[in-house]
Structure formats: C-alpha cells, structure tokens
Image: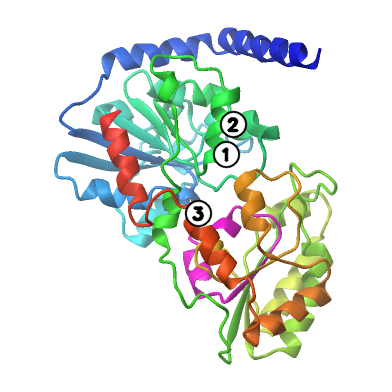
C-alpha cells in the first residue's frame, strides 16, 4: 500500500509539473533546436551573477574559459530583485552589489541596469552558454530569468553552496521553473545528483543527461595542506560561523547558537588576548534577528561596540576565502561553508547534529568535534591549541574520498562538459 501511494504521488507530481511549467518546457525545447551542439568548442559564454558571494562557485571555470582563445567570455552583473525593489521604475538606481564587487576585485563586468534606465539586452551578445549560480528566477529581472534566456542560449547551473541537507526541501532549493530550462545542472555531491535524478521530472530534450556531478568547483580554490592541524602559534585564529535561522527542532532548517553564545564569545575574547577571533555571520542573520525581534537595534549596537573593544573581527566581506584560509580552528553551526573549511584539513568544532543531513553531510559532520555547550568549545580549543587533534588522520582520508578528481581540475572538467554538451 505504501509503495502504491508513493507511486501515485510520484506520477501525480510529474503530471502537475508538466502542466504548471508547460510554457517553460516549450521555451527550452525551442532554444535547443536553435542552439545545437557546437562541435568546435568555440562561441560566447556568459556568467550571470546576481549574488556576489556565489562568484567563487564559478571562479575556476571562468579562469579556464579565459585561457581559451576560442571563447568570448563575459560577466553580467545583475542586481538582486526582491519584494522591496521588484516594482521599482528607476532601474538605473537599483543597487547592484555584483557590479560593485567585480569593480573592487578588478574583473571586467557588464552592468545589467544601465544608466539610461534600461536593462542590458543579453541577446546582443548572442550567447551559446549562460551560466547561473542561483536557481531562483524570482530574484532576477524578468529579462534574465532562465525561462526567457533558454529560448536563445543554453542554460547551465553551478551550485552556490555545498549541499549537505537531505532532499526534504529539494524543490525549494532547486525549483522546477528553473530546472526545466537548463541543459546541465552540476551538483556539489553525488547524493544531490541521485536525489535530483530520482525526484525531478525529466522534461525537455536531452533531460536524461541534465544532472551531473563532476566535483564542487569551489574546492579548486583550496590547496590541501598536510600541516592542516591547528598550530601552537601565539596568535591562534578562531573563526565562528553562526547560522541565521532560529527554527529549533526542525532538522530541515537547522538553528543558530548565536544568541546562546555571543556574550560568552565576547568574554572569551576579553580573557584570551592571544587569540584572534573572527565572526562571520550569514548575510541574512542580523536583518532577520532585527525584523523578528530576536535582537533589538540597541542590543546589536552594543554587541558591535564590544567586538570592537575586544578586537573581535566581524567579517562581512563578499568573499570569505581569506577568513577560511587565515583561521586555524572553525566553530560552526550547520553551514555549507563547513565543507569548504573541511577541505583545508583544519579542525572544526561543530555545534549541531547530523540529523537531516545527506550521506556526504553525515560523513563530514560525523567526523567533526562536537560541542553541546560553550564550556566544551573552550575545552576543545585548548586541546587543539596543544596539538591534541586526534581526528586529523580521519579527515585526511575523508577528503580524498569526497573528491571525484584533483582540486584544481574541477572547473576545467566542468567547462569541458559545458562546451561539449
């Protein structure tokens, strides 16, 4: 009986999805007929970036593309669309954080919202491949939504985060109005690929090859260091990554320990001047806390003032790589950045459980040091500082197991698959 219910649910979803997104599927099929396979591996590739924090997901692919003299390579910087600015009539005034980011790091980019109050017409570039790092059409202007772009270019997705949560929220994190318009969806791990192949309807031509796992390209940015144990240097650097959600008891969302531990972290900093402490809050955390009255504006200001007083750094840069590379120890709630820090070989103190995680999540987070209280965090920091990192060898073995190829080659392999698809 249970099998029958699951089968009915499965095919019912297939039917509803088709009729709900029929127009998008037709757009995709029409675009495939216009843009067939380019056998010469030559053409125009566009990286569409609306979320600057996601740039590291495609950085190694972009760098490989720039080496190819057969390719014209463009970066299109797009402002994020939200409920606050969705109906704005002044396009030129929309905040374009991606364009500011690329200007700051010295990467040439096209500003999507032009000074004359119009959107840059992506079709003018005659793109063969357009790469997205966020699968949420509602956060892009209509002109750049994948169901429109797929009519004149092949669309690809590179994940902005390493997926460690189970498939309970699959259709939320990989919505079908986007998925049905893609030629390839590259997943961060094998579990996510299997989940997608099992649950996402395969509508559209060549959809059987839509989901691919060739490695997580952000791992190209890390060189595994055999000296990855926490050192006994005088200025030990500790990074704290508190989560932004507060849904306690919901393993799908995971919750934050920020409110529980932030005053204790301040006390720790005051009493341990030999430590450098970096707190990297999720970009949504403080706005979410203020909006939901979890913190007041006054409490947030007091916290910021105390951090400045005791030398705690609040890292709110768009690029977090420096924080990961500079840190000796990570203290973290559930975060996709745990997987990236893990690849450095350095130790992690984990303030959550493996509940609700997929296979890779359980393997990674199951080999971390657990802490159920701040006293346990402090105790483990002391042990690591004294060289007591008993799980160091275990981490080395798991890192090798999780990589389908060598770091430094993931972006190259994904670009090859894009050009040959």
Q: Which mark is residue 195?
A: 2
Using a 10 Å C-alpha cutoff, classify the residue at mark 3 as few (fewer than 14 neighbours), some (14 to 19) or many (20 or more): few
1 or 3: tag closer to the N-terminus? 1
**Screen quadrant of the N terminus:** top right
The residue range painted magenta reads: 318-340
Residues at marks 1 and 2, CA–CA distance in whole angstroms: 6 Å
Image coordinates of residue 309 in percent, x first then y, are 69, 84
Q: Secondary structure at mark 3?
A: helix
Q: Nearer the viewer, residue 200 or 19?
A: 200
Quarter of the image where one finds residue 250: top right
Circle 1/circle 2 CB separation < 8 Å: yes
Using a 10 Å C-alpha cutoff, classify the residue at mark 1 as few (fewer than 14 neighbours), some (14 to 19) or many (20 or more): many
For mark 3, what is the residue? 401
Residues at marks 2 and 3, CA–CA distance in whole angstroms: 20 Å
Q: Is residue 73 above or below residue 206?
A: below
Using a 10 Å C-alpha cutoff, classify the residue at mark 2 as few (fewer than 14 neighbours), some (14 to 19) or many (20 or more): some
Q: Nearer the viewer, mark 2 or mark 3?
A: 3
Residue at (65% x, 43% y) in the render: 358
For mark 1, what is the residue? 191
Residue at (71% x, 89% y) in the render: 272
Residue at (62% x, 65% y) in the render: 280
């Amino acid at each position: 009986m249970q099998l029958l219910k699951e089968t009915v649910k499965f095919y019912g979803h297939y039917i509803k999805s088709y009729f709900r997104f029929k127009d998008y599927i037709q757009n995709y099929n029409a675009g495939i007929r216009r843009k067939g396979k380019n056998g010469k591996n030559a053409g125009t590739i566009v990286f569409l970036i609306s979320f600057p924090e996601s740039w590291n997901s495609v950085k190694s692919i972009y760098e490989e593309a720039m080496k190819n003299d057969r390719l014209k390579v463009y970066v299109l910087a797009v402002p994020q669309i939200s409920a606050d600015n969705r109906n704005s009539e002044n396009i030129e005034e929309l905040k374009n954080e991606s364009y500011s980011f690329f200007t700051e790091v010295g990467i040439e980019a096209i500003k999507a919202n032009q000074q004359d109050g119009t959107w840059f017409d992506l079709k003018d570039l005659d793109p063969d491949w357009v790469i997205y790092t966020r699968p949420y059409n509602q956060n892009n202007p209509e002109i750049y939504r994948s169901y429109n772009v797929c009519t004149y270019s092949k669309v690809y997705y590179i994940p902005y985060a390493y997926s460690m949560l189970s498939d309970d929220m699959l259709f939320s994190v990989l919505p079908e109005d986007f998925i049905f318009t893609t030629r390839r969806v590259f997943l961060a791990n094998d579990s996510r690929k299997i989940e997608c192949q099992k649950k996402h309807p395969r509508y559209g031509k060549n959809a059987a090859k839509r989901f691919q796992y060739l490695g997580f390209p952000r791992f190209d940015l890390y060189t595994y260091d055999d000296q990855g144990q926490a050192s006994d240097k005088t200025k030990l650097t500790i990074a704290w990554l508190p989560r932004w959600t507060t849904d306690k008891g919901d393993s799908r969302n995971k919750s934050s320990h920020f409110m529980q531990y932030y005053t204790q972290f301040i006390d720790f900093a005051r009493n341990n001047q030999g430590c450098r402490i970096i707190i990297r809050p999720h970009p949504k955390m403080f706005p979410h806390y203020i909006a939901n009255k979890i913190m007041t504006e006054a409490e947030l200001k007091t916290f910021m003032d105390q951090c400045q007083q005791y030398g705690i750094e609040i890292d709110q840069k768009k690029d977090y790589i420096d924080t990961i590379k500079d840190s000796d120890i990570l203290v973290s709630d559930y975060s996709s950045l745990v997987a990236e820090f893990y690849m450095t070989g350095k130790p992690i103190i984990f303030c959550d459980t493996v509940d609700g995680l997929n296979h890779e999540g359980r393997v990674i987070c199951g080999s971390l040091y657990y802490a159920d209280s701040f006293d346990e965090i402090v105790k483990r920091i002391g042990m690591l500082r004294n060289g007591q990192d008993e799980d160091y060898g275990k981490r080395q073995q798991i890192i090798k197991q999780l990589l389908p190829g060598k770091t430094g080659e993931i972006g190259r392999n994904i670009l090859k698959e894009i050009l040959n698809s």
